[in-house]
Amino acid sequence: MAGLPRSFFSVELCFSFTQAMRVHDEVRRVLNRTADEAPPGLKWSNHRAIADVLLTSIESASRGCWEYMDDDTSDVMWDDWLLPMTDRSRQPAGNEAGGWFTMTMMLQAKKNTATDQVLARAFAGASDSLWTRGTFATMLQAIPAISFSNVVRDALYLMPRDTTCGFTDDELELERMKYLRVLG
């Protein structure tokens, strides 16, 4: 993908299975109907549906992380954010139901397009209140305004996908999980 200037956008939220099982179930339903090679309109619809679920449940989110980059680190950030899907050490290690789950939304957009500008505006005000639910809500509210014709690649992932073993409290305190900030 080298050569094409693009921006990188990601949002990850962490929820307790105890408090937000409905969120997990609704997101999983959307993901189950998502095909890797879906046309842009269907991808937009799926991202919007997940953003809507997360927005209506934002008060239940306990931790989160977001990024927006519009420089040459876009590919590096993409690869880094995909690691939990391929690196078993970054997935839940527990074998008991319950605990915590994360939902991650990622996009790479063509730089300087209307989509990139919408995402940049959503992140512009975040420096004043980095790790608040309101900041995450602002970012998620931008999703309906983007055009997937300007999205180079996208990913949605729910970790874990099933409810047999979530992240434990101890796992959330490990160095590898410190990127998930406690939300205010």
Image: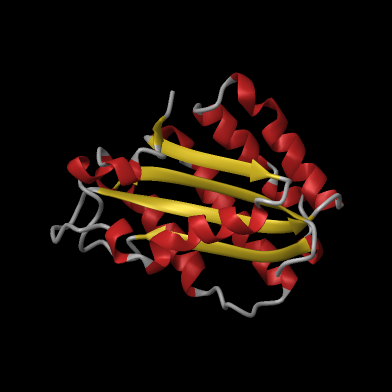
Foreground residue among 88 and 23: 88
Q: Nearer the viewer, residue 52 or 118?
A: 118
Vertical placement of 32 versus 61: above or below?
Answer: below
> With 12 as the anchor, is 93 left or right in this view?
left
Q: Nearer the viewer, residue 163 or 129?
A: 129
Q: Which quadrant of the figure contains the N terminus?
A: bottom right
Q: How many marks?
A: 0
Q: Position of residue 115 (x, y in %)?
A: 79, 51
88 horizontally vs 115: left or right: left
Q: Residue furthest left?
A: 96
The residue closer to the viewer here, 145 or 118, is 118
- Residue drawn at 73 percent across, 44 percent down: 119
Q: Is residue 61 visible?
A: no
Q: Is residue 99 above or below residue 3?
A: above
Scheme of colours in the image? secondary structure
**Quadrant of residue 39 within the rendered picture:** bottom right
- The residue depicted at 52 percent of the width and 74 percent of the height is 33
Indicate the position of residue 84 as horizontal and vertical percent values: 40, 60
Residue drawn at 16 percent across, 57 percent down: 94
Q: Is residue 179 visible?
A: yes
Considering the image in quadrants, where does the C terminus appear? top left
130 relative to 146 in the view: left or right:
left
